[in-house]
Image (cartoon, rainbow, N blue to C red):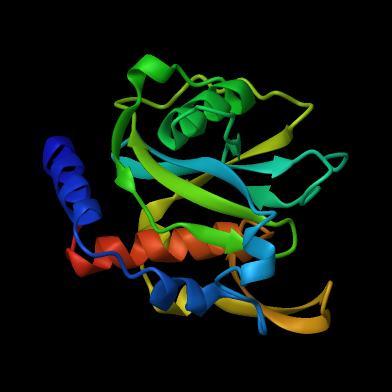
Amino acid sequence: MKDDFISQVHELLQSELPGEKAHQKLSPPGRKLKADLDAMEAIKYSSVLLLLFPIEGTIYTCLTRRNPNMKTHPGQISFPGGRIEEGEHPELTAIREAQEEVGIKPNDVRLLGQLSELYIPVSGYSIFPYVGWMDYRPDFVLNKEEAEELILLPIQQFLVEDKIKHVEMDTVRGRISVPYYPYQGEVIWGATAMILTEFFDVLKSGQLTL
């Protein structure tokens, strides 16, 4: 089952991705999905890792709650990741940052492919999301300066559309109704939810059973 799942995910990620069509489902109202010309001049680039791993036959990914003292998106739920250093390939950034934030072993990560680039207008970042696989549950070690909590998310539970809820939230554009994924009392929204949605849609397109 494991080898079939890995090969199918890899194959699906090489095909045409849903991109904006998927992102739009979890996009807060009025959010720009692409940078305009002025913003593109100052855009910054980062990578994140959507890491898959098994726990007792169930496929999980890991998210973190960002340290509330972080300059960007403090206290929000996100994937391990960070800014791409000069001359660094984005996929190496994703793995390096995951090692620094949650203590994974880079040599044990098998990269399966890349999801669509996603622009975040609030911080001016454009994100390159990568999907990786580990054969075992990592021995996570949190870097508390960046991540104060680890959240293990079972992928199977989110492959249904009715998991999407809405909540009133204060944002830079005022108080709006924001789409999100609820999980164990957490509100997973914004870029993290948009990346997850594209991945879920990729899995659904291949009718994968986990």
Residue 82 located left or right of residue 122:
left
Considering only vertical position in the picture, is 197 above or below 29?
above
Considering only vertical position in the picture, is 60 above or below 195?
above
- Residue 62, percent from left and from top: 51, 40
Considering only vertical position in the picture, is 155 above or below 190?
above
Q: Quadrant of the N terminus?
A: top left
In the image, what residue occupies the spot 22% across and 49% down? 9
Residue 95 located left or right of residue 27:
left
In the image, what residue occupies the spot 39% across and 68% down? 19
- Residue 130, percent from left and from top: 40, 43
Residue 110 located left or right of residue 10:
right
Considering only vertical position in the picture, is 36 above or below 67?
below
Q: Quadrant of residue 149?
A: top right
Residue 194 visible in the snapshot: yes
- Residue 41, percent from left and from top: 66, 57
In the foreground, 104 or 97: 97
Q: In the rendered picture of this protein, how many numbered marks are placed on residues? A: 0
- Residue 78, percent from left and from top: 62, 48
In the foreground, 103 or 30: 30
In the image, what residue occupies the spot 54% across and 51% down? 127
In the image, what residue occupies the spot 52% across and 65% down? 194
Q: Quadrant of residue 64?
A: top right
Residue 55 visible in the snapshot: no
